[in-house]
Amino acid sequence: MCSVNPGHQTRISYNFLLLIILQVGLRKVEGVWPLPQTFTSSTERYPLKPQTFYFGYRQQSAAQQGCSVLDVAFKRYFSVIFPGYTSGNDHLRCEGKAFFVEISVDSRDCESYPKEDSSERYNLSVADGQASLNAETVWGALRGLETFSQLVYQDDYGSYFVNKTDIEDFPRFPFRGLLLDTSRHYLPVSAILKTLDAMAYNKFNVFHWHIVDDPSFPYQSRTFPNLSKQGAFHPMTHIYRQSDVRRVISYARMRGIRVLPEFDSPGHTKSWGRGQPDLLTSCYKRGIPSGTFGAVNPAQPSTYQFMMSLFKEVSSLFPDSYIHLGGDEVDFSCWRSNPYIRAFMQKMGFGVDFPKLQAFYMENIVNITSALNKTSIVWQDVFDYHEQLSSLSVVEVWKQGCYLCEVRRVAKAGIRVILASPWYLDQPGPTHNWARYYTVWPLAFTGTEDQKRLVIGGEVCMWGEYVDAANLSPRLWPRASAAAERLWSDEKQTSSVDNAFPRLQEFRCKLLRRGVQAEPLHVGHCKHEYQGV
């Protein structure tokens, strides 16, 4: 994996920091994170007062009053911009010149869910004491509202201002994800919702929910209730009920975030076997069962009947068109020890080629989810073993090493790619190593333009071995913000760590003000320290 000298970004002179402080005082649009694609700004500024400020729809906009996503967003961003104030219509009767943020949306997609091809493009203009936000979809409007909220600042006397600004913006990659692992440590729904808030502030748009794994099965299935009864850490307190899942999906939708579930198999399934007898492979020792179990048994028809029923339920609950099927780190030793598995392999003509057996299993699972109109994502291992597997749609690269080599290999095979390997944040480390996540170049491989277009984005992965609700936020933020800008912004404009540092430091202070426990980047202070809200 490519990296930078971990001490490089700490050797910033105090003269340089002083210069940055002076620049921040001008409050240019460079303070927006992630950096917009194109912008112009000036020191001309306009005063804002919560009593005379409101959002509204342009008359010819496809989205009008009653667009739930935007109506809720207006109230949410009013409170973000003016902490301690509540938005309402009464303030319009107050004296003083009103400041309008006028919204225009081309398509009426207010009641839908964000999709893989949803436009997030927007234009934002602030001039003459008002702002104009134009977007193709409500999801683009949400991104523009986030940008506007970051443009607003306070002077030393507490007065609010926004500078004259013009922005044309859109994401560099359509898939900008963040993975949370809720199996190794259970994360309360409240912690997930707070993470979704922070994701929206960073313009992430995919929540990858690694909901079950070896340690626990917290997803409460209606079809197979014993999976969580027997497989969760606690069958009542450490589960996600169907209502919890719907709440997370709804909360994410209101922030323009897709929820992508992962049910990883055939490995990482020990918790599954506690509530579903005969699903896992019985391990043998000296020709007799040892009492231990390995990966899912791929030789039994009942396995696929179970998977069909489970994924039918999951597909009806999660509206996104993508589903993650895992397929990583399969231990073949149990399959190898089981005489019935070996006999099945001989019957199928696999010989002793266990990767072929895994390919057989994954092909069946992909076909099941395809029949449910879901696009499957698999971890890199599936591609490593089975490059010619015709059913592969999207491969997620996670293994350490030369990530560009792996991305190039998958793209060369004509398969879409998600990059994750440089953005594993579960291990603790000094916050100043954010630069190693910033200096990731997903398209810096030798290949054709068509191949590079197959790289649909990347995601930050927060595995749960050493992470629970107590340390989730400070371990994520602001290091995940470095990946957020890499996935949203133009590469040429964001190639300098030194230029990014003061903007990220300022953005970290904004996260604190919004109640996100983001770790400090350097010696200093924020005007608004974390208040635990």
Image (spheres, grey):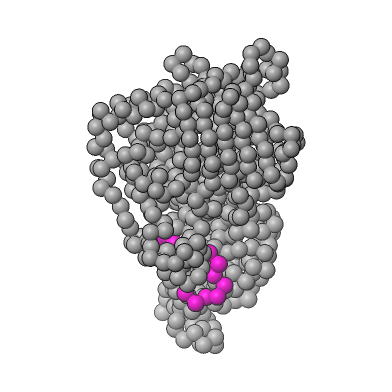
Can the viewer see residue 29? yes
- Which sits in the foreground, 372 or 222? 372
Q: How many marks?
A: 0
- Which sits in the foreground, 493 or 259? 493
The quadrant of the rendering that contains the N terminus is: bottom left
The answer to whether residue 374 is above or below residue 468 is below
Residue 150 image point, x, y percent: 51, 31
Q: Residue at x 67, y 64 (%)?
A: 373
Q: Residue at x 60, y 59 (%)?
A: 322
Query: Which residues make up the magenta segment?
Result: 387-399
Is residue 213 left or right of 243 when viewed as pictured?
Answer: left
Residue 162 included in the magenta stretch of the image = no
- Which sits in the foreground, 186 or 84? 84
Residue 392 included in the magenta stretch of the image = yes
Task: Name the image quarter holding residue 299.
Answer: bottom right
Residue 481 image point, x, y percent: 44, 42
Residue 377 image point, x, y percent: 54, 63
